[in-house]
Amino acid sequence: MSGGTTYGNSTDTNNGPFVSGDYVETGATGGLVGNFSKYLNTGLPMDYATASGLANSDRHLAVYKNAVADGTRYSVGVVDSGAPLTLYQLVRVGSNNSYFSGGNTTSAGAADNTGLWVGTGTVSRVLYRNGTSVASNATGSDTVNAATRPFFVFAQNNNGSAVGTSDERQSAYSIGASMTATQVSDYYTALQAFQTALGRNV
């Protein structure tokens, strides 16, 4: 494609690094698996929304994954501790899943933790699992520092350092503009078809 604008790395930077054996294309173990130390640096800054002409609050994070061990483990995230503190992340804390973005939404939940998780919204925030809303926060604020810290995948970029690296298996992730409930449902349907076509068990 020509004429597009690159807001992050053209290719995610492999830190760890992940090796060929960490990725399986098809079957029940399909996807990329972490080991509590490896992560990807997307190069996409936390203020990507404004950089791409969107409102600060117009964004989503998504990950299609399998279960992870208990403890604070990040699927994708970034934090800047300047004033104001700014958080964007999908995180597992024990058996809970939370999406934070200024204000936060929390799903007290799903023990198996699998499937497609999407945190999205403009001013209000909604957390979806497999296309269904599981939590919301109507007052989530979203003040963005003029911060260029990039999102990490399989970890949180905490002021430049990877923390809470995960051992989960991910078969897709995305960062972008916000989605409606219908778009989240359609996204889940499409990704489920893709995973099924590859024989993946996620």
Image (cartoon, rainbow, N blue to C red):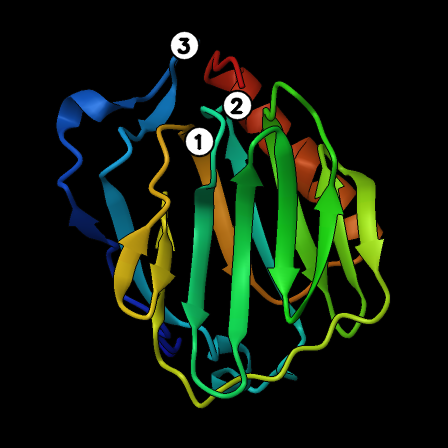
Marks 2 & 1, CB-CB < 8 Å contact:
yes
Residue 95 drawn above or below residue 180: above
The span from disc 1 to disc 3 (Cα, nearest Å) is 11 Å
Which residue is disc 1 drawn over? 171
Rounded to the nearest whole Å, what is the CA distance between mark 2 and mark 3?
9 Å
- Which corner quadrant of the image does residue 187 belong to? top right
Q: Which mark is residue 195?
A: 2
Q: Where is residue 47 in the image (x, y as percent from the top left)?
A: 48, 80
**Residue at the image point whose x is 46% and y is 17% from the top:** 198
Query: Which amino acid is tagged 2?
Result: Gln
- Residue 148 placement, left or right of 201: left
Which label was assigned to residue 27? 3
Observer-side mark, 2 or 1, equals 1
Tell me what residue is drawn at x 66 percent, y 53 percent.
119
- Check the picture and name the quadrant holding the C terminus: top right
Cα gap from disc 2 to disc 1, whole angstroms = 8 Å
Which of the two discs, 1 and 3, labels the residue nearer the N terminus? 3
Q: What element carries label 2?
A: helix
Compared with 19, 139 (above or below) is below
- Residue 82 location in percent, x, y? 43, 84
Front in this rendered view, residue 108 or 172? 108
State the image coordinates of residue 7 (x, y, percent, origin top left). 37, 74
Kindly identify the amino acid type of the residue bearing the numbered disc 3.
Answer: Gly
